[in-house]
Image (cartoon, helix red, strand yellow):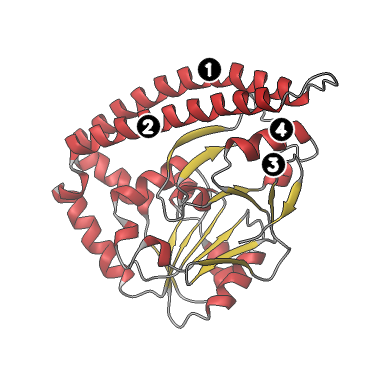
């Protein structure tokens, strides 16, 4: 079964698990579900409220705890991954230095109004320079990750094989996989280490917030007014690639200045090969039979290339 054929439900933040309950009702599950709460890190096991909201039997795969045990038992693995992270961090710093200036220039030219000359070409050129930087950075991060994976051969490491076998046995008992929010990079790394998507690919999957972001083709961080930092949306790295046409924006209404036409236009045009879909507390995006649709909850919207929020069309 291809990744594009798996039934998916993507959600935004779940402070009260309201849309998660709606999504579970949509699936009409007959058996237990698997939980991935690795994004909560050391609080991974604090899942009582989530279990109560689900209302059916659930099995936490404990991916964060499993990884911590792996690191303790296989020091080479953690040391090599730390070296990889150091390379990625230095590359990200250089990317952000360049990104800051290019986004500032692009916003200025988008906002500029001239009555004597058409600046559309200049605007597109400025945005294309940002796209080119994103593409270059995306390729470089992928090359670093691939180089370290070739060295590590994670899937063949004896202790990883043991964990994958145990997880496979657990997944044989469930009817769906649920992935919570939290630290996106940690979710992404744990999904890869344990080969979650390769095991039982026919299982429906529900993800929210950081879990949704980790499943995308690209992971893009965004926050127009963060407590610290420049507030520039940035490409982090390749995601799990479970879908290629959607860029999910969980909690976008509170994280993005959606009334700033220049920012919205730049975001939408910069990532114009995706539909930049806003996923908030009550929105539900489902992919079934390879087609996207909104179910229940609030109507789905996405960022428009004219600088406004528009209705989502699959």
Report the disc number at residue 305. Answer: 3
85 displayed left or right of 244 = left
Question: Where does the image place residue 110, in percent across and percent down from the top left?
Answer: 73, 26
Is 38 located above or below residue 77 in the figure?
A: below
Residue highlighted by disc 4? 263
| Residue 269: quadrant of the picture | top right
Residue highlighted by disc 2? 139
Q: Choose the circle earlier in sequence order: 2 or 4.
A: 2
The structure residue drawn at horizontal position 63% and vertical position 57%, both measured from the top left corner, is 14
Q: Choose the circle earlier in sequence order: 2 or 1.
A: 1
Residue highlighted by disc 1? 98
Question: Where does the image place residue 241, in percent across and percent down from the top left?
Answer: 41, 51
Q: Secondary structure at mark 1?
A: helix
The alpha-carbon separation of the residues under discs 2 and 1 comes to 16 Å
The alpha-carbon separation of the residues under discs 2 and 3 comes to 25 Å
Q: Which is more foreground, mark 1 or mark 3?
A: 3
Q: Choose the circle earlier in sequence order: 1 or 3.
A: 1
């Amino acid at each position: 079964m291809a990744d594009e054929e798996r039934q998916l439900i993507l959600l935004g933040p779940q402070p009260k698990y309201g849309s998660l309950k709606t999504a579970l009702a949509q699936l009409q599950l007959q058996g237990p579900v698997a939980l991935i709460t690795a994004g909560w890190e050391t609080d991974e096991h604090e899942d009582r409220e989530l279990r109560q909201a689900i209302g059916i039997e659930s099995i936490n795969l404990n991916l964060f705890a499993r990884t911590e045990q792996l690191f303790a038992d296989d020091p080479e693995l953690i040391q090599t991954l730390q070296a990889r992270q150091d390379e990625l961090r230095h590359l990200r710093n250089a990317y952000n230095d360049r990104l800051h200036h290019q986004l500032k220039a692009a916003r200025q030219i988008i906002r500029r109004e001239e009555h004597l000359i058409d600046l559309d070409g200049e605007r597109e050129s400025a945005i294309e320079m940002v796209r080119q930087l994103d593409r270059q950075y995306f390729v470089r991060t992928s090359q670093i990750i691939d180089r370290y994976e070739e060295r590590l051969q994670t899937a063949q490491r004896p202790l990883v094989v043991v964990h994958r076998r145990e997880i496979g046995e657990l997944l044989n008992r469930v009817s769906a996989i649920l992935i919570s929010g939290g630290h996106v990079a940690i979710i992404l790394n744990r999904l890869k280490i344990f080969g979650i998507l390769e095991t039982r690919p026919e299982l429906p999957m529900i993800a929210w917030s950081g879990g949704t972001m980790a499943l995308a083709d690209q992971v893009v961080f965004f926050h127009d007014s963060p407590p610290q930092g420049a507030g520039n949306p940035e490409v982090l790295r390749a995601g799990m690639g479970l879908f290629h046409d959607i860029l999910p924006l969980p909690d976008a209404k509170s994280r993005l200045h959606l009334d700033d036409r220049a920012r919205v236009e730049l975001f939408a045009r910069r990532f114009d090969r995706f539909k930049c879909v806003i996923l908030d507390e009550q929105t539900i995006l489902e992919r079934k039979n390879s087609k996207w649709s909104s179910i229940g909850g609030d109507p789905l919207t996405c960022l428009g290339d004219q600088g406004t929020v528009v209705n989502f069309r699959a």
